[in-house]
Amino acid sequence: MRIYELMFITDPRLPEEQREEGVEKVKKVIEERVNGKVEKVDRWGIRKLAYTLPKSKLEEGDYTVILFRADGSELEPLENLFQVSPEFVRKQIVRREDIEKEERKKVIQNRLNGTVEIEEPAEEVVEEVVQEDSEPEFDVEEKGE
């Protein structure tokens, strides 16, 4: 299974309960229809957008980032959810090859060391709410010019 990062923006004019239901709906689609496994849910809260959206005239959005594992050929139901649900303003799904490479390196290193990696039972999904004052954390490597 591949590792993906999904970032989506929900309309901030909706009540908090409805925005939270939207996050739960996305998690449910990932687990049931995409046959994926949600590993981390990171709610950033309402933040200013880079530009005003032309149709809706929104200047802010409620950001959520979900890290999940799934087979790449089964992402269509997730794409369809964002196309038919008006509460979602924008979305982006990115394959996290950097995390996949690090996991492969650990497995190879464990084999060379003679240790066997035993997969532990799945932990509960970690949800974080980032305060508006704090900056979100990114696992991005700087590239030279």
Image (spheres, rainbow, N blue to C red):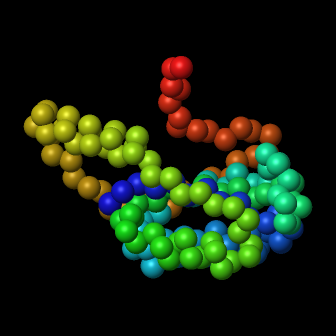
Left or right, 106 with reference to 81 = left
Vertical placement of residue 120 versus 115, above or below: below
| Residue 124 visible | no
Vertical placement of residue 97 versus 144, above or below: below
Image quadrant in which the N terminus is located: bottom left
Left or right, 35 with reference to 90 = left
Image coordinates of residue 101 in percent, x first then y, are 33, 41
**Residue at x 21%, y 47% (from the top left corner):** 117
Image coordinates of residue 41 in percent, x first then y, are 57, 58
Vertical placement of residue 9 versus 80, above or below: above
The picture quadrant where one finds residue 137 is top right
The picture quadrant where one finds residue 93 is bottom right
Front residue of this view, candidates 100 and 93: 93
Image coordinates of residue 42 in percent, x first then y, are 61, 54
| Farthest-out residue, top | 145
**Residue at x 48%, y 73% (from the top left corner):** 76
Front residue of this view, candidates 7 and 127: 7
Image coordinates of residue 54 in percent, x first then y, are 84, 60
Left or right, 129 with reference to 41 = right
Front residue of this view, candidates 106 and 54: 54
Left or right, 132 with reference to 20 = right
